[in-house]
Image (spheres, rainbow, N blue to C red):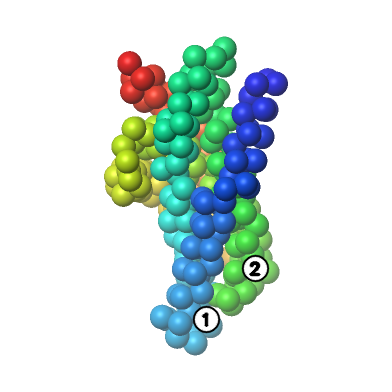
């Protein structure tokens, strides 16, 4: 556990020191959410109705930024080989790096969503629902993306390939995230149903994503 915690702290420090994915993703999130009201017009009722979907789509796309560097940076400087030959199981290594990536990317997106909801004329209940669903759902986006990052770790400029690989797999998370946020503000489906499905997707993605990424890295290293 000491090695696991140290790896999480290491990746968070590196992300804070050199910038990149976290700050860029948050800026991209802000730009997307800001542009939409200008494109749709001043119809506040329409904005408040589609606001949760806009925030979720923007968060999904923003999560992709920096995912290609999840393993690629360590692959380029040789530290990934050292980490893989250590005593920590490869799946735990992936889990640690995924948690660090979520902490600098997914968590800031969830925290910023209620503030950006003001631009979309969201009610306080809708802002809270979007925050909770993003907080629960963004880990699924991170660990789904981790599989693609592991598969493209040895490719230069593999960001486009990564997006093509993982975006279709992120659609169920997007569907249940938007459904849960919409249900919290008077949808036809109870909030609990899509929210629990979203929780299940996140838990399953963490397990399957960690194992799948570990297998991809192991085969790539052979």
Question: What residue do we see at 43% from left, 56% from top?
Answer: 61
Question: What residue do we see at 66% from left, 61% from top?
Answer: 128
Assess whether mark 1 and mark 2 are in contact (beta carbons under 8 angstroms).
no
Q: Position of residue 91 (x, y in %)?
A: 50, 22
Q: Secondary structure at mark 2?
A: helix
Q: Position of residue 141 (x, y in %)?
A: 47, 44
Q: Quadrant of residue 153?
A: top left
Quickly name the residue at label 1: 45
Question: What residue do we see at 45% from left, 75% from top?
Answer: 36
The residue positioned farthest toward the top in the image shown: 87
Q: Position of residue 131 (x, y in %)?
A: 62, 57
161 lies above or below 122: above
Q: Is residue 80 left or right of residue 192?
A: left
Quarter occupied by the C terminus: top left
Question: What residue do we see at 54% from left, 67% from top?
Answer: 30
Callout 1 crowding tier (Cα within 10 Å): few <14, some 14–19, many ≥20: few
Looking at the rendered image, the disc whose residue lies closer to the viewer, 2 or 1, is 2
The residue positioned farthest toward the bottom in the image shown: 42
Callout 2 crowding tier (Cα within 10 Å): few <14, some 14–19, many ≥20: few
Quickly name the residue at label 2: 115
Camera-side residue: 80 or 93? 80
Q: Secondary structure at mark 1?
A: helix
The residue positioned farthest toward the right in the image shown: 2
218 lies above or below 189: above
Q: Position of residue 214 (x, y in %)?
A: 43, 23
Camera-side residue: 47 or 109? 109
Q: Is residue 158 visible?
A: yes
Q: Is residue 60 visible?
A: no
50 lies above or below 147: below
């Amino acid at each position: 556990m000491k090695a696991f915690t140290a790896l999480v702290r290491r990746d968070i420090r590196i992300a804070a020191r050199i910038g990149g994915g976290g700050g860029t993703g948050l800026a991209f999130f802000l730009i997307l959410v800001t542009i939409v009201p200008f494109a749709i017009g001043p119809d506040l009722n329409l904005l408040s109705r589609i606001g949760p979907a806009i925030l979720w789509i923007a968060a999904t796309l923003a999560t992709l930024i920096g995912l290609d560097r999840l393993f690629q940076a360590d692959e380029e400087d040789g530290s990934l080989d050292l980490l893989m030959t250590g005593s920590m199981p490869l799946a735990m290594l992936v889990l640690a790096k995924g948690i660090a990536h979520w902490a600098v990317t997914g968590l800031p997106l969830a925290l910023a969503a209620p503030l950006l909801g003001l631009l979309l004329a969201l009610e306080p209940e809708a802002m809270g629902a979007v925050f909770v669903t993003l907080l629960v759902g963004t880990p699924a986006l991170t660990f789904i993306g981790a599989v693609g990052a592991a598969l493209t770790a040895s490719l230069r400029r593999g960001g486009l390939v990564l997006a093509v690989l993982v975006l279709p797999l992120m659609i169920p998370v997007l569907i249940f995230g938007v459904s849960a946020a919409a249900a919290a503000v008077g949808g036809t489906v109870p909030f609990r149903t899509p929210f629990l499905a979203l929780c299940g997707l996140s838990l399953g993605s963490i397990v399957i994503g960690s194992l799948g990424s570990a297998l991809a890295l192991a085969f790539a290293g052979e």
